[in-house]
Amino acid sequence: MQDLNEILEACKRGERLAQRQLYEKYKGRMFAVCLRYADKREDAEDMLQEGFIQVFKDLSQFKMLGSFEGWMRKVVVNVALQYIRQKRNPRPPLLNIGMTWIMQKNWTRTCFPKI
């Protein structure tokens, strides 16, 4: 296995093998973090998956100052908190019907200001 800096550089280049190595190295610890925020194991698994997606997206922002694991934990915690907020207050989908936007639960508002 490569050292962490080599794996991170390869991940930044989008190399799948390096991403897999990073996932395998940290999945257990990050899953434990997700379990602290989740009501169900399935939610923790979703948080973990979304967390790793966000880590790979934001990897270029990690400046190699300080602990990578600490940075990654912060990303995963932020994803978990966002997941919880979305689960508590889901946004119903909007439907555009004619000139009226209709939200679920019979809530309506017109697209145009009232005159």
Image (spheres, grey):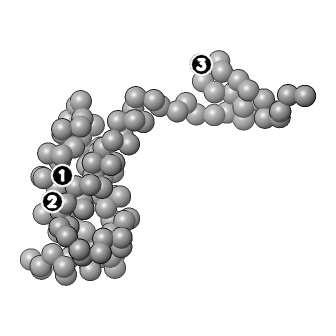
Label number found at residue 30: 1
Q: Amino acid at mark 2?
A: Tyr
Q: Quadrant of the N terminus?
A: bottom left
Q: Residue at x 59, y 19 (%)?
A: 105
Q: Which residue is mark 3?
A: 105
Residue 11: x and y in percent read 28, 74
Q: Residue at x 58, y 34 (%)?
A: 93
Q: Which residue is mark 2?
A: 26
Mark 1 crowdedness (10 Å alpha carbons): few <14, some 14-19, many ≥20: many
- In the image, is residue 82 above or below residue 88? below
Q: CA distance from mark 1 to mark 2?
A: 6 Å
Mark 3 crowdedness (10 Å alpha carbons): few <14, some 14-19, many ≥20: few
> Of marks 1 and 3, which one's residue comes earlier in the chain?
1
Whether residue 98 appears in this view of the structure is no
Nearer-the-camera pick, 63 or 76 = 63
* Secondary structure found at label 2: helix
> Of marks 3 and 2, which one's residue comes earlier in the chain?
2
User: Mark 1 near mark 2, Cβ–Cβ under 8 Å?
Assistant: yes
- In the image, is residue 55 above or below residue 48? below
Figure label count: 3
Residue 20: x and y in percent read 21, 66
Q: Amino acid at mark 1?
A: Met
* Secondary structure found at label 3: loop
* Secondary structure found at label 1: helix
Work out which residue is located at the far right of the displayed protein and give it: 115
